[in-house]
Structures are given as C-alpha cells and as structure tokens.
C-alpha cells in the first residue's frame, strides 16, 4: 500500500486526462495514491460532459485547452497524465503550453496502428444496445487482463462523448501532437496484457523519440490499467517525477 509517512510536496501538479468516453472517476484510486505520495493532483472531467460544453465541433486543441484550464495558474509546473485516448490530449497540452508542461505520462497509450481485430470489442464495450453479458465479454477482451474483474467498467461510459472525441481527434493533425512538442520527457507506462497496445509494439515510441521516452511495463493489467493496478501506476508516476530535473521539485 501507499506509504503516507513519506508523502512530501514536490512543487509539481499532476493533471489527469481520462480515456475515451470515460470520466475523471477512473482516476479516483490512482489520484488518492499520488496525493498520499505528496503530489498535487487535478483531475477534471473531460470537455463535453458538463452542461453547455459543445463538443460537437471541437478538435484536440479544444480538449487540451480545457484540460489545461483546470490547473490554477499558480499550480507550478505541470506533468500531464493521459490514459488511453487521454494521452493524445496530454500530448497536445504539452504542445500548447510548453511554458507550463514539463513532462507527459502516457498510460496504456495505443500506437499508430490499433489491431483491427480488437476494434469491435472497443466499440462493443460501451454499446448500450448490447446485453450486459455481451458488453462484459467485449470489456474483458479489449480492456482487462485475464483473471481481472471487468464488471466495474460496465458503468461510466459516455457513448456520445466518445463519438465526439473521436471526431475531435480526426480534426487535428497527428503530426502536431504525436511528439508532445519534441522537448519534454515522456513516461510511457504500458500494460503487459494490453490487447489494444500489444507488447509487440512496446518500444515503438522509444525507438522513434529516443531517450526522451522512459518505458515502464506493469504486469497483470490490460488497457484499462487504472482499476487493475492503481498502486503500481501511482508508484511509477511518482518515481518518474522524482527524477525530473526541476528546481521546484529538487530534493
């Protein structure tokens, strides 16, 4: 478990972006662990969930701008953490705010090509027309490691938001955000049993970007990752932040 006795303020704020069609509640346990380890954490709902937020014409810049706006101006350096689809938002945030974003953490980030055979289960996971049993089967196949309980993810899906987020990403040039601005360090936390971002592609981003990228693999987890291994995720993020060469968090 988390050792709260070693918790220490490090002067950096962790800004969290959830996965496709899902809300900030996915980060509840991980965020609690990070706070216990001494970090300031901001986990806003994604753009489009609140009343009056028109995501229909948004692009990825819109989603990243909304994420950045959730961090108070006096919050200090930002490490932006994005889970699955949220990692695209995190990378765009680094591009849009290089003066604030000092690092990016990718959680279960899909690569340039998602295996075609898994796409039906991605869509089926949050299709309200399907039976609970069918959805559970899709969730297990696409998001959870064998032996993990996928039932907690039967809830928490926002299909209309997911559709709008996909369109938002399609409206933005991938070349603009893929490298997260080309400067900041990147922690690439991967799940060993991830069907959407399989282990065979584990070094793809590091091979492309070199020493900017630190790869950490967490076992007994799939693409969902957060409900499967929250302690390991929080500890990996904490270890990465400790190594950042930022005066405000030097120890």
Image (cartoon, rainbow, N blue to C red):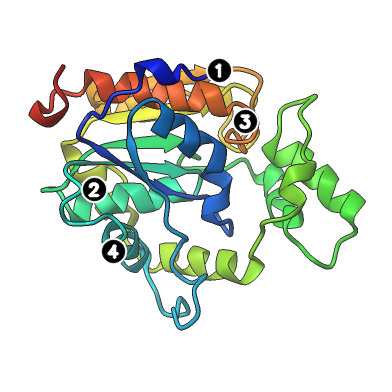
Location of mark 1 (residue): 1
Closest to the camera, between mark 3 and mark 1, is 1
Q: Residues within 10 Å of mark 1 (few under 14, many from 20)?
A: few
Structural distance between the alpha carbons of marks 3 and 1: 24 Å
Q: Nearer the viewer, residue 211 or 68?
A: 68
Location of mark 3 (residue): 194
Dot 4 falls on a residue whose secondary structure is helix
Mark 3–mark 4 CB contact (< 8 Å): no
Please identify the quarter of the rendering in which residue 7 is found. top left
Position of 78 relative to 132 (above/below): above
Residue under the image location 31 percent in, 22 percent down:
240
* Label located before the other in sequence (2 or 3): 2
Residue under the image location 34 percent in, 28 percent down:
187
Closest to the camera, between mark 3 and mark 4, is 4
Residue under the image location 17 percent in, 56 percent down:
73
Location of mark 4 (residue): 65
Q: Residues within 10 Å of mark 3 (few under 14, many from 20)?
A: many
Residue 34: percent from left, percent from top = 42, 31
Q: Residues within 10 Å of mark 2 (few under 14, many from 20)?
A: many
Position of 182 relative to 220 (above/below): below
Determine if residue 175 is in view. Answer: no
Residue 84: percent from left, percent from top = 51, 44
Residue under the image location 54 percent in, 23 percent down:
231
* Label located before the other in sequence (2 or 1): 1
Dot 1 falls on a residue whose secondary structure is loop
Closest to the camera, between mark 4 and mark 1, is 1
Mark 2–mark 3 CB contact (< 8 Å): no
Structural distance between the alpha carbons of marks 2 and 1: 31 Å
Residue 28: mark in rendering: none
Structural distance between the alpha carbons of marks 4 and 1: 34 Å
């Amino acid at each position: 478990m988390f050792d709260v006795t070693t918790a220490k303020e490090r002067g950096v704020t962790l800004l969290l972006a959830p996965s496709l069609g899902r809300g900030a509640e996915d980060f509840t346990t991980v965020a609690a662990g990070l706070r216990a380890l001494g970090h300031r954490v901001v986990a806003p709902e994604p753009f489009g969930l609140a009343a009056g937020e028109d995501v229909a014409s948004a692009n990825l810049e819109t989603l990243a701008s909304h994420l950045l706006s959730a961090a108070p101006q006096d919050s200090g350096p930002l490490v932006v953490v994005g889970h699955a689809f949220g990692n695209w938002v995190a990378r765009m945030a680094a591009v849009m705010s290089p003066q604030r974003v000092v690092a990016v953490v990718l959680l279960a980030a899909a690569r340039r090509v998602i295996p075609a055979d898994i796409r039906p289960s991605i869509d089926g996971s949050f299709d309200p027309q399907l039976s609970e049993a069918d959805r559970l089967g899709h969730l297990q196949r696409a998001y959870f490691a064998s032996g993990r309980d996928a039932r907690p993810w039967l809830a928490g899906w926002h299909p209309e938001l997911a559709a709008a987020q996909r369109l938002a990403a399609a409206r933005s040039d991938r070349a603009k955000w893929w490298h997260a601005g080309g400067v900041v360090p990147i922690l690439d936390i991967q799940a060993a049993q991830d069907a959407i971002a399989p282990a065979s592609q584990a070094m793809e981003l590091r091979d492309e970007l070199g020493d900017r990228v630190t790869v950490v693999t967490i076992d007994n987890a799939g693409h969902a990752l957060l409900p499967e291994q929250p302690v390991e995720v929080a500890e990996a993020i904490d270890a990465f932040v400790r190594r950042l060469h930022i005066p405000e968090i030097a120890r």
